[in-house]
Amino acid sequence: MTAPAMRDDAGAPGEGTRARGEPMREAAGRVSMRGIVKRHGTFTALHGIDLDIEPGEFFALLGPSGSGKTTTLRILAGLEPLNEGRVLLDGADVTFREPGERDVAMVFQSYALYPHMTVFDNIAFPLRMIATSPDAVERAVRDAATKVRIDHLLARRPGQLSGGQQQRCALARAIVRKPRLFLLDEPLSNLDAKLRLETRVELRKLQRSLGVTTVYVTHDQEEAMTIADRVAVFMEGRIVQVGRPQDIFTRPATAIVAAFIGSPPMNLLPADVRGGALHVAGVELPMTRSLGADGPVTLGVRPAALRIAPTGLPARVYLIEDLGDTTIVDLDVAGQVIKLRTDHRPQIREGEQVHVAFAGDACHLFERDSGLRRSV
Ligand SMILES: Nc1ncnc2c1ncn2[C@@H]1O[C@H](COP(=O)(O)OP(=O)(O)OP(=O)(O)O)[C@@H](O)[C@H]1O
Ligand SMILES: [Mg+2]
């Protein structure tokens, strides 16, 4: 694959004379955010965001709508003033630097294309800003457009494109050069399911080959978990967990994170730890593993860890959803619906009384009050 035309960074301070073993300068694309607070009047959108992103990382900001992902990205880009905190890029404080001085390429949630320009000229724009030769522009634009499959649309204007095509045009404009950072805000949200999956893979491959640090905003947990090296989970203007997707999946830090990750997400039930046993829905479940101190907890079990068994929690089969290769069974346990996922269609009927069981090491325990994971 040909890399898009490189920006000539020779003029940047210190870049040309960078010495080996000098960590600050070698680390192109390192991001640090320190104590970022953002207020809109009396409403606080960000309550002190701390974030460290390594050079070359594909880093996802994941969280529900309104949790502060776009605000964080815009502060990183220099598009949004902040109330408190600092932003550092490769060790340099850029908190008060203009967006143009930060060398970032951003794809917005709304695509912000130039309506009077053709698709070709829109994609070429960042290259022409840095005086690239016409031949190099031509090659880089075609290359970027091919990667996102709009190379047949280069002569059109944005108004003559579908929403998904406009989004891919914005993506091509971002990847046409090699900036210090890619900042992508839900860049695939307008693509249909199939194209979304394909573009996601392309984007990941492209980012790997370019090695550009990428901050990727999404509210889709599956997207974040499959595409990112690491994920920061946002809830109500705070980061509640940072980690590799696998770590967040296997050890969610809070009950709320647990309920946000996985498809379907983790089941949560009120329970009590008493004398080494777990009491759930009026049933005592002896456990061989350590459960920690006696007290009220929230029990978490992933749908795939549940099975229908001769003994366990009494449940009524509420609904059976056959999804082809897997089956989701909704079960009513003491008035609360939990989901079981299995690859084998269980021999049960809707309305039937059954028992549901799970292995001790498959259960997660969170403090009932704080929601924090028990360290057991
Ligand atoms: N100009 C503004 N005035 C007041 N509140 C704002 C303003 N801009 C954003 N907010 C609020 O700040 C919070 C964070 O917004 P933000 O756009 O960062 O959320 P998000 O996580 O990107 O959500 P989504 O997934 O819906 O895009 C939201 O509650 C939003 O309503
Ligand atoms: Mg947003």
Image: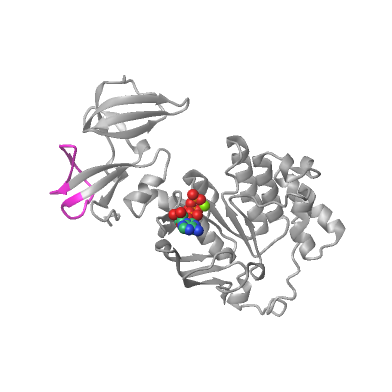
Q: Residue at x 74, y 76 (%)?
A: 11
Q: Residue at x 15, y 53 (%)?
A: 294
**Residue 50, position as x, y percentages in the image:** 45, 67
Left or right side of 97 for 156: right
Q: Nearer the viewer, residue 232 or 49?
A: 49
- Colour mapping: one colour
Left or right side of 376 for 304: right
Left or right side of 242 for 202: right
Residue 244 seen in the current view: no
Tag count: 0
Segment colored magenta: 273-296
Q: Find out whether residue 281 is within the magenta segment.
A: yes
Q: On screen, 225 above or below 304?
A: below
**Residue 274, position as x, y percentages in the image:** 14, 48
**Residue 174, position as x, y percentages in the image:** 68, 55
Q: Nearer the viewer, residue 59 or 138?
A: 138
Q: Residue at x 78, y 43 (%)?
A: 156
Residue 293, by quadrant, is bottom left
Residue occupying the far front of the picture: 41
Q: On screen, 150 above or below 353?
A: below
Residue 33 seen in the current view: yes
Q: Find out whether residue 148 is within the magenta segment.
A: no
**Residue 302, position as x, y percentages in the image:** 35, 40
Residue 316, by quadrant, is top left
Q: Quadrant of the C terminus?
A: bottom left
Residue 48, by quadrant, is bottom left
